[in-house]
Image (cartoon, rainbow, N blue to C red):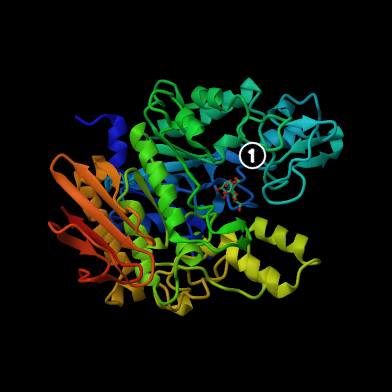
Amino acid sequence: MMTKREEFFNWIVYQIYPRSFYDTNGDGIGDLNGIKEKIPHLKSLGINAVWLCPCYKSPNNDNGYDVSDYRDIMEDFGTFSDWKRLQKALKKDGIKLIMDLVFNHTSSQHKWFQEAKTSQSSPYHEYYIWRKNPPNDWKSVFGGSAWAYNESTDEYYLHSFDETQPDLNWENPKVRQEAAKIVDFWVKLGVDGFRCDVLDFISKDFKKDKMFQGPRLHEYIRELFDRDGVRDIFTVGECQADKKNTLLLCGKNRGELKTAFQFDHINLGRIDKYLPRPFSFDEIKSVLVKWQKFSQKHDLIYPLFTDNHDQPYYISRLGNDKAHRYACATAYATTFYLLRGVPFLYQGQEYGAANPYYTKIEDFRDVETKRYYAEQKKSKPRHQLMQEINYASRDNSRRPFAWTKDERTNFGFSAATPWIPCNSRAKEINLEKDLESERSVFRYFQTLLAFRKGSLAIRQGSFQDRTKRRRGCFLYERKWKRERLLIVCNFDKKQKIKLPKNRKFLFGNYPEAKEEFLPFQAAVYEL
Ligand code: TEU
Ligand code: CA
């Protein structure tokens, strides 16, 4: 019998950014009914869980990461009944549902904040973080000071993100109780898990120079999740954690999180968000090997991902999205999704979506990007600034899903003008075209995910690095009882890679390599 925890290794999660997935009512905005209609696509891809980015009521300053009611659905996306129908439909097809919890902050439109800001005697005032004067010079993640002035109380409030996203005061037990009640509300409705937005921000130490991972973080998380009826649910935190903290957050008997996103492999190849630096694949490999060994040693569940709604596409930034787009997309998928842990795919990856390019700031929507542009435009030449934005903007991965080749329906996304312009490369990169081509990213993903599901070595087995001193490639072994697999991925130019003699080629993104591995060639062997 598998324990509840072991079962998580069977999950394959697909992240949906609802605004950009599929529009069914012709307003240019993706919606919940759109997700429901595309369940056959999800099934045919082979995933078995969906992480739904926030779909709660929200004024949408940060595309739903600014919640104004945690128990209601954003009008743009539909109604509560639509949500229930979606949940039911997913369940019917055996697809788990993970909701996004945004608990570090609310929207300034949330009724708590609306009350809190009016007077210091409001019962909601202490739901947020107020100071007569800013006690430090913390910067908002989106730029500028993290402290904003509120006239009616003559105080400053803390906002780690946009001004319209005031941070909740977790030191107030009432806030913690409210959060727990919201968790209970969704658990009772039958959701299968939560992705917890910037969870490592909820406890603060105002004397420190950074605003996250304050002293009471672990206590708060346990209070939220280590409770009857909630304890066994799937949770993945968005936390920037080192080894020590990962053990505290995700350790087996800690009662905190099932897993936490690790960003070491995402933060490679750049000096800061907007500035690339030369990088080699070996850096990714080292990060993966380090975390594989560590999570294996401590029996942690490791989240396997390359993309999300906050990042430019991985293949564009750290790979090749031109001549080798097919191979690169499939090689990264092979590398990551056959490791030990739980795969997370982001919408679009399955057809090899890549970063677009725009020359005008008007083609962007992200609050962070627009802020950055406004801040920098006086000091930087326009072309340089646009280059930085195209390199780093979160809008890169937030363009409408390109379902078809049909430009008039915005590539099958919506007959109406989409809320954000379609990917400028959608004519060349879309699902329909991908399926027509001989080398289809989608079909490869199908093979890969089906293989993962069918293999105990991949789901339960051990991990061992077999790369040795070779460069520009990654070889690793997965093993469970008598099933032994070797995964080989080349991220360099064409090169010879010596392999064990007694091997059987199972599949790869190219036909079996004879002598040399092509750039981004990936292959799976049985030993
Ligand atoms: O992101 C948190 C976060 O710190 C980063 O991923 C951040 O968005 C990025 O570095 C800025 O470029 C989460 C959500 O994933 C993000 O979409 C939200 O905007 C943010 O929290 C606030 O809720
Ligand atoms: Ca719509």
Total number of numbered labels? 1
**Is 263 above or below relative to 217?**
below
Give the residue drawn at x 61%, y 36%: 201
Coordinates of residue 33 in the picture (x, y in percent): 42, 55
**Is 440 above or below relative to 368?**
below
Query: Judging from the image, what secondary structure is the residue with disc 1 in?
Result: loop
Coordinates of residue 385 in the picture (x, y in percent): 70, 68
Mark 1 surroundings: few (<14), some (14-19) or many (≥20) residues within 10 A: many
Residue situated in front as seen by the camera: 76 or 194: 194
Residue at the disc numbered 1: 106
Q: Determine which quarter of the picture holds residue 301.
A: top left
Q: Determine which quarter of the picture holds residue 45.
A: bottom left
**Is 41 above or below relative to 243?**
below
Say what amino acid the circle numbered 1 marks. Thr
Residue situated in front as seen by the camera: 424 or 95: 424
Give the residue drawn at x 66%, y 23%: 172
Q: Residue 149 vs residue 228: left or right? A: right
**Is 93 above or below relative to 101?**
below
Coordinates of residue 378 in the picture (x, y in percent): 81, 66
Coordinates of residue 306 in the picture (x, y in percent): 44, 55
Q: Residue 108 vs residue 318: left or right? A: right
Quadrant for the N terminus, please: top left
